[in-house]
């Protein structure tokens, strides 16, 4: 095992898969800097295509490349830019296999980095993954550790269908152990980050560290918290979540996206439909409120779920 950052894990996945599979190409605005900065080996430069700032255009370029036998990784730079490419992602990439009766596939990866807590304001601070959870034909991944982001990216690049990977830039410098040997993390499989028996805590993306810290604090108060990271939101590993809730009888969900129509809302609905009789208390959601993210650092910081919010939600379950 090696200790590397989340950011380094991302580009290890890129380089290893590009060496393994010559059909993998990178597409995105200004990404020639990857080789100039030594992030990716300059020997791979011929398969890195820097584009103008035209998200709908270069996502369409990626879809076309995928249909002709390549495996593009399209770098959208900032997650909010997915809105500009919705037609190519939703109408083309996600639906192509169905619309061609299975004759065409789109093995493409869209990378979207979520920026927050850095005064990026309303146009650059969104977490759009809930929008894509309801798109049939599209897989949605939100990794939270260096191990997971590398393994899931490698799995996405080997997948024959479109995958959109939402990375959280607040995790870029988070360190973690990653195997030196080749490995993948299966898409659609959750990970139990901490075993527990009294409460199920489902944590998404960058909220994992605060969730584990909250679980540690609650353990000192005699409450055993099981922490589950779905890792993939579509397809969602409902069996792991439902099995845990059936044992604990209590559920809190920590989701840094806006509260309404969120991943937290969907998970809450699934649990209420399928294991309602196991619930001892109403499900608690810890989310960002339904507001546009302000530029002001002082205002922005107050909006996101934090350890004290998570602890308060767990206490409500008792």
Image (tube, grey):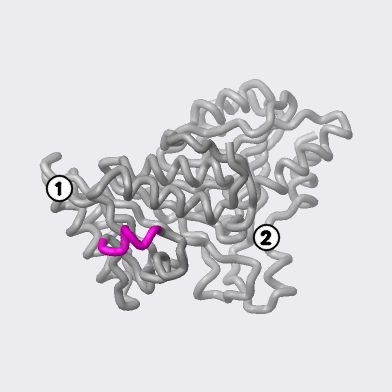
- The reply to whether residue 268 is visible in this rendering is no
Could you tell me what secondary structure mostly forms the magenta stretch?
Answer: helix
Pointer 2 residue: 304
Q: Residue at x 50, y 26 (%)?
A: 239
Asked which secondary structure carries label 1, the reply is helix
- Quarter occupied by residue 29: bottom left
Question: Which corner quadrant holds the C terminus?
Answer: top right
Residue 147 relative to residue 100: left or right:
right
| 253 is higher (above) or lower (below) than 300 | above
| Mark 2 closeness class: few <14, some 14–19, many ≥20 residues within 10 Å | some
Asked which secondary structure carries label 2, the reply is loop
Of the pair 156 and 182, the residue shown nearer to us: 182
Residue 83 relative to residue 125: left or right:
left
| 222 is higher (above) or lower (below) than 256 | above
Q: Residue at x 63, y 61 (%)?
A: 289
Q: Residue at x 82, y 37 (%)?
A: 218
- Quarter occupied by residue 21: top left
| Mark 1 closeness class: few <14, some 14–19, many ≥20 residues within 10 Å | few
- Quarter occupied by residue 32: bottom left
Q: Is residue 247 magenta?
A: no
Q: Is residue 45 magenta?
A: yes
Q: Which residues are magenta?
A: 41-46
Residue 295 in picture, x, y percent from top left: 63, 78
Q: Earlier in the sequence, mark 2 or mark 1?
A: 1
Q: Which mark is residue 99?
A: 1
Asked whether the residues under the numbered discs 2 and 1 touch, taking CB atoms below 8 Å apart as contact, a structural biologist would say: no
């Amino acid at each position: 095992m090696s200790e590397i950052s989340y950011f380094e894990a991302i580009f290890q996945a890129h380089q290893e898969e590009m060496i393994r599979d010559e059909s993998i190409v990178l597409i995105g605005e200004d990404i020639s800097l990857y080789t100039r900065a030594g992030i990716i080996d300059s020997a791979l430069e011929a398969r890195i295509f820097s584009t103008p700032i035209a998200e709908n255009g270069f996502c369409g370029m990626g879809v076309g490349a995928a249909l002709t036998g390549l495996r593009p990784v399209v770098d959208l730079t900032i997650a909010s830019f997915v809105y500009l490419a919705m037609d190519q992602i939703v109408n083309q990439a996600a639906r192509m296999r169905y619309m061609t009766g299975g004759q065409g596939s789109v093995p493409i990866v869209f990378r979207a980095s979520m920026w927050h807590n850095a005064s990026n304001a309303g146009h650059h601070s969104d977490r759009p993954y809930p929008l894509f959870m309801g798109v049939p034909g599209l897989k949605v991944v939100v990794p939270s550790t260096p191990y997971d982001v590398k393994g899931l990216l490698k799995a996405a690049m080997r997948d024959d269908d479109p995958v959109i990977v939402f990375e959280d830039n607040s995790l870029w410098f988070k360190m973690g152990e990653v195997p030196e040997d080749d490995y993948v993390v299966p898409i659609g499989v959750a990970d139990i980050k901490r075993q527990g028996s009294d409460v199920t805590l489902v944590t998404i993306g960058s909220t994992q560290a605060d969730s584990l810290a909250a679980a540690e604090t609650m353990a000192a108060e005699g409450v055993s918290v099981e922490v589950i990271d779905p890792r993939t939101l579509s397809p969602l590993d409902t069996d792991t979540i439902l099995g845990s809730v059936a044992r604990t009888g209590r559920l809190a969900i920590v989701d840094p996206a806006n509260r309404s129509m969120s991943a937290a809302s969907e998970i809450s609905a699934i649990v209420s439909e399928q294991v309602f009789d196991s619930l001892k208390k109403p499900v608690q959601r810890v989310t960002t409120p339904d507001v546009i993210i302000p530029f002001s650092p002082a205002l922005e910081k107050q909006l996101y779920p934090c350890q004290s919010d998570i602890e308060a939600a767990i206490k409500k379950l008792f």
